[in-house]
């Protein structure tokens, strides 16, 4: 065991430029970090810059450090998707070869009818939509009729929106469990069912942090399962537990925001453990990427950058701090969906002598392979470990 604790932070959707196959996903020219830096020329990320962020790709206002404090590079996604589950599963050693089903025309009527029958409420919506736009369109109708708002996106998601004062949270979660049961397998096989509660009055609806995700289980053991089976700790912060449906997790903490996720990560680093601390910071994606808000996205990046020194401080010589992402979500790209991009890779420990480039990794799974390698936990069969390169 080279490192005792590995703290892996996924900045959800913080991509670093189009992948060669981006045109196939409608994402030619996408560049989440690059376009934010261009749109918000005042953006400075001095701490990520010190680690080597600007050495991965040219970014306006962020220099390429001459002596980066972290190993740096970028990783390509080989799986056939650009959603959160696919990205995280690939990071943890799986290659998703069959895409999840998507529903650009909405869900088949027979599924909707079964859902209505089992829940005792009607469905309105049933189409791809932005989660905030659909509330503007249908929130008032839901308040009047008590019907479910069902919507999807370019991802494989069955999203169920409900006003907390019209359909109580408990009933919303029950509705999601019913939807989960109905869509678990073919012919629907939906990646995720998501509870989307909101509050407020027409014209001023706001979504609450009581969102809850019901994912399918990863189709094979991931690096997290390998670690858990090898007796290591696998601590999940934020959405991680949902994304893996609890598989391979030994302890989980949900979060309310990026800042909450950073605080919880810092707190966990104060305790002794041996294994992986795996954090997802989702605000980048849900509050700014999907909302096509480059200014908000820049502020969130800035906030993470300000807390980074604290995270580095708590990373001891026997620890590794790894920062990456799961896909892109370029706030300047047309539409409101994810973008098919490389993700950044920064690997820091105060014990590293002269960090240099890790190059372009052929798959996100190189990261998982490195984690498994470090703990002598075996292999999922995907990815090449870069552990020996870290000196
Ligand atoms: O527009 P909202 O509701 O935020 O939905 C987004 O969030 C979903 C899950 O991450 C994505 O599939 C996308 O549809
Ligand atoms: Mn994501
Ligand atoms: Mn998303």
Image (spheres, rainbow, N blue to C red):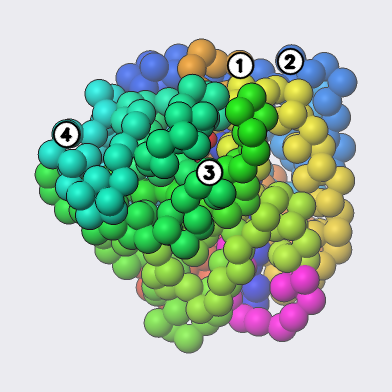
Q: For the residue carrying disc 2, how many other residues have a C-alpha within 10 Å: few (<14), some (14-19), or many (20+)?
A: some
- Residue on which the image places disc 2: 38
On whether residue 97 falls in the magenta region, the answer is no
Q: Earlier in the sequence, mark 1 or mark 4?
A: 4
Q: Position of residue 289 (x, y in %)?
A: 60, 29
Residue 261 visible? The answer is yes
Using residue 109 as the reference point, say whether residue 390 is left or right of it.
Answer: right
CB under 8 Å between discs 1 and 4? no
Which circle marks residue 332 in the picture? 1
Is 147 in front, or is 6? 147
Calculate the distance from the C-alpha at mark 4 to the C-alpha at mark 2.
Answer: 44 Å
Q: Position of residue 237 (x, y in %)?
A: 61, 63
Kindly state the secondary structure of the residue where label 2 is placed.
helix
Query: Which residues are the magenta region?
Result: 267-278
Q: Earlier in the sequence, mark 4 or mark 2?
A: 2
- Residue on which the image places disc 3: 163
CB under 8 Å between discs 3 and 1? no
* Residue drawn at x 18%, y 41% as measured from the top left: 113
CB under 8 Å between discs 2 and 1? yes
Calculate the distance from the C-alpha at mark 1 to the C-alpha at mark 4.
Answer: 35 Å
Using residue 257 as the reference point, say whether residue 23 is left or right of it.
Answer: left
* Residue drawn at x 76%, y 52% as measured from the top left: 259
């Amino acid at each position: 065991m080279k490192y005792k604790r590995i703290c892996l932070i996924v900045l959800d959707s913080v991509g670093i430029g189009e992948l060669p196959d981006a045109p196939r996903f409608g994402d030619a020219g996408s560049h989440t970090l690059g376009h934010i830096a261009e749109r918000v020329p005042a953006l400075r990320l001095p701490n990520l810059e010190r680690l080597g962020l600007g050495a991965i790709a040219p970014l306006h206002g962020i220099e390429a450090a001459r002596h980066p404090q972290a190993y740096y590079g970028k990783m390509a996604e080989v799986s056939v998707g650009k959603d959160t589950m696919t990205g995280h599963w690939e990071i943890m050693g799986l290659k998703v070869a069959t895409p999840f089903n998507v529903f650009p025309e909405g869900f088949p009527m027979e599924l909707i009818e079964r859902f209505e029958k089992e829940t005792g409420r009607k469905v309105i919506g049933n189409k791809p939509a932005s989660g905030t736009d659909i509330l503007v369109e249908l929130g008032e109708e839901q308040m009047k009729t008590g019907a479910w708002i069902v919507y999807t996106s370019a991802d494989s998601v069955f999203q169920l929106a409900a006003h907390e004062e019209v359909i109580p949270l408990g009933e919303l979660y029950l509705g999601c469990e019913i939807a989960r049961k109905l869509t678990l397998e073919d012919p629907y096989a939906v990646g995720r069912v998501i509870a989307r509660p909101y509050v407020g009055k027409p014209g001023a609806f706001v979504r609450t942090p009581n969102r809850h995700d019901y994912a399918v289980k990863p189709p094979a053991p991931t690096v997290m399962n390998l670690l858990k089976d090898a007796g290591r700790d696998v601590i999940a912060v934020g959405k991680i537990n949902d994304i893996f449906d609890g598989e391979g997790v030994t302890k989980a903490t949900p979060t309310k925001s990026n800042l909450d996720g950073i605080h919880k990560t810092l707190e966990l680093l104060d305790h002794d453990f041996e294994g992986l601390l795996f954090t997802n910071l989702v605000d980048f994606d849900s509050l700014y990427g999907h909302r096509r808000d480059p200014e908000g996205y820049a502020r969130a990046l800035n906030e993470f950058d300000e807390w980074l020194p604290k995270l580095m401080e708590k990373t001891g010589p026997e620890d590794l701090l790894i920062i990456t992402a799961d896909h892109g979500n370029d706030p300047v790209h047309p539409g409101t969906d994810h973008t098919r991009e490389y993700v950044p890779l920064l690997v820091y420990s105060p014990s590293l002598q002269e960090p240099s480039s890790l190059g372009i990794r052929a798959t996100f799974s190189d990261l998982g392979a490195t984690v498994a390698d470090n703990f002598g936990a075996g292999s999922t069969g995907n990815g090449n470990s870069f552990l020996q390169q870290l000196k």
